[in-house]
Amino acid sequence: ITDYEPGNINQFGFTILHKSIEEKNNAGIDNIERHNRQLTQQLLDGLAVLPVQVIGDYTTDCRNSIVSIREETGLHALLLEQNIITTLRNGLIRISIHYHNTEEDINAILEAIRLKA
């Protein structure tokens, strides 16, 4: 190789990564986990009374803050129309709860599912 252009360090990317880690550390990892578990359980409790098939148990004992439900009625498209971002993979709607989500967010997704049912 006679020419080699190594490029530059992605300083912007490192700055964003540093800020993101700092933000999570300031919030507290244990607090984030507790928050995510509470919202996940709220979602599971709400889904338990709706006509959807949840994959896995209705508790947070053996799951992270991701809930998957079967996509059978065009629900994913309806959620997108209401600016509720989920992922559709292999016939499953994946709902990922993050530390920036709120109880109102969970209520919104439950209400959207209720309307579709």
Image (cartoon, rainbow, N blue to C red):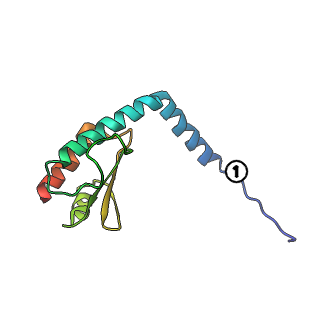
Residue 87: percent from left, percent from top: 35, 59
Residue 94: percent from left, percent from top: 33, 56
Identity, as a three-letter code, of the amino acid under mark 1: Ile
As drawn, 34 above or below 93: above
Given the current orientation, which residue lies at the most extreme right position?
2
Question: Which residue bears the numbered disc 1?
Answer: 9
Residue at x 48%, y 34% (from the top left corner): 24
Q: Which image quarter holds the N terminus?
A: bottom right
As drawn, 117 above or below 35: below
Residue at x 73%, y 58% (from the top left corner): 7
Pick the residue in front: 45 or 111.
45
Given the current orientation, which residue lies at the most extreme bottom position?
1
Pick the residue in front: 9 or 20.
20
Q: Horizontal placement of 8 versus 32: left or right?
A: right
Residue at x 21%, y 67% (from the top left corner): 72
Residue 96: percent from left, percent from top: 36, 49
Residue neighbourhood size for the residue with mark 1, other residues' Cα within 10 Å, grouped as few (<14), some (14–19), many (≥20):
few
Q: Secondary structure at mark 1?
A: loop
Residue 18: percent from left, percent from top: 58, 38
Where on the picture, by quarter, is residue 52? Answer: bottom left
Pick the residue in front: 56 or 19.
56
Residue at x 29%, y 55% (from the top left corner): 55
Q: Which image quarter holds the C terminus?
A: bottom left
As drawn, 93 above or below 102: below
Q: Horizontal placement of 11 versus 57: left or right?
A: right
Numbered marks: total: 1
As drawn, 63 above or below 31: below
Where on the picture, by quarter, is residue 64? Answer: top left
Where on the picture, by quarter, is residue 106? Answer: top left
